[in-house]
Image (cartoon, rainbow, N blue to C red):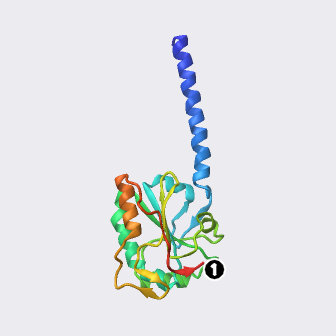
Amino acid sequence: MSPKQTIKHKYKNKSQHYFLLLFMFYGLMLFPCFGQKLRSDTTLSFNFSDLSQNKASVLVFFDIDCPICQKYTKLLKEINEKYQGQGIKIYVVYPHKNIDPVAFKDFKTNYQFNLPIYFDKKQKLLHRLKGSVTPEVFLISNMGITVYHGAIDNWYYSLGKSRAQATENYLSDAIEALIKGESVRVSYHEPIGCAL
């Protein structure tokens, strides 16, 4: 190896080293709950940093006792089935300390809800994302950027008041835009649900 090649080789290794350090630093900044493992009602668990492995992730703050959450179980399953093959993963997050395994089992049976529910007992994820109600969704890119958050759609327009069916599908529209590499037109819609 010539002196010129040696210098180039050393510079390349140094550049790679700096890039790795920079990536780790920004990884910690973008995924602030790095290392926080959330367990679920199944054998699955995840760290917030794992979201970088998906094309995008949908985090849904969800309460099995919230009537509005109960109404959205079917739609959440449909969204998961539609987009999971395209690298979009849904994480249903229960942001409460008290967990009753029997109540969760009954809920899943009654609503035929097959998605894992992750427990944010210490509410670190809730506070970091500043969630306020259930259901409330956060669409997060694999770079850790929240590209949309708020309501799933406009089915509910006030507590206890809903349309016969949704006429605007905020979350699905945002996912479609992200998949196509387009900007999400509206990044926030006020969520309607049970206060946290």
How would you rate the neighbour count of disc 1 (Cα within 10 Å): few for under 14, some for 14-19, many for 20 or more? few
- Type of amino acid at the residue the image marks with label 1: Asn
Q: Residue at coordinates 55% horizontally, 11% vertically from top-left?
A: 3
Label 1 element class? loop
Q: Residue lying furthest right in this view?
A: 122
Classify residue 173 as left or right of residue 17: left
- The residue at the far top in this view is 2
Q: Position of residue 189 (x, y in %)?
A: 47, 70
Task: Return the residue at label 1.
Answer: 98
Q: Residue at x 66, y 70 (%)?
A: 122
Percent coordinates x, y for residue 179 in the rendering: 36, 56
- Please report the residue visible at 50 percent of the width from the left and 51 percent of the height from the top: 143
Against 72, residue 43 (above or below) is above
Q: Quadrant of residue 186?
A: bottom left
User: Measured along the vertical axis of the image, is residue 132 above or below residue 161?
Assistant: above
Q: Position of residue 157 (x, y in %)?
A: 44, 81
